[in-house]
Image (tube, rainbow, N blue to C red):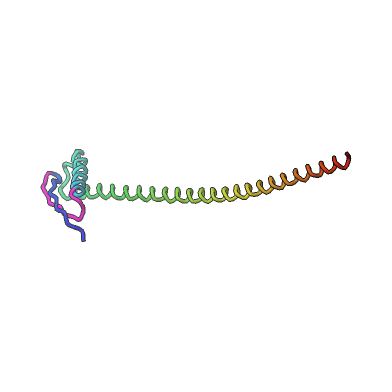
Amino acid sequence: MSQKTDVEVIINNKKYVICGSESAEYLEKIASYINRQVAALKSEEWYRSLEFDMKNVLLDINIADDYFKAKERINEMQQIQDETNKDLFELKHEIISKQTKLDELTNSYEQLEAEYKEAVKKITELETKLNLSRG
């Protein structure tokens, strides 16, 4: 079972203790992310005049927006990876096919070369016999 981590953080100028099964650094990273989101909203003039509940809803919406954009990016990257893996598989298959064809051609070449050498040897023998019979 995971060990619980308690971390004191400051979010939007208020002190909180957050706990989780993640590391203290990770929990502090979350608090830092929320603080950046709050700061971005606070920098907008229109945001300051909103009621507390609406400010929280906007913060939630911004965080959810980041989440869904990140999730979509992950899906896009997964799709690219899947396509790349498919292309890689096809290339590997093509390499194996070409290697098999090369092996077949090499064997054929070696066989033809052996037949050629045998034919040259036979021609030399026949020429020698012909020259001896003439001579």
x%, y% of residue 97? 57, 50
Give me the residue at 10% from left, 47% from top.
15
> Is residue 14 located in the magenta-colored stretch of the structure?
yes
**The one of 36 and 91 positioned closer to us in this rendering:** 91
**The one of 132 and 6 positioned closer to us in this rendering:** 132
**The one of 50 and 35 positioned closer to us in this rendering:** 35
x%, y% of residue 96? 54, 50
Residue that extends furthest to the bottom in the rendered view of this protein = 1
- The answer to whether residue 55 shows anywhere in this view is no
x%, y% of residue 65? 28, 48
Give me the residue at 31% from left, 48% from top.
70
Give me the residue at 16% from left, 41% from top.
48
Q: Quadrant of the N terminus?
A: bottom left
67 on left or right of 91: left
Give me the residue at 15% from left, 47% from top.
51
Span highlighted in magenta in the image: 13-24
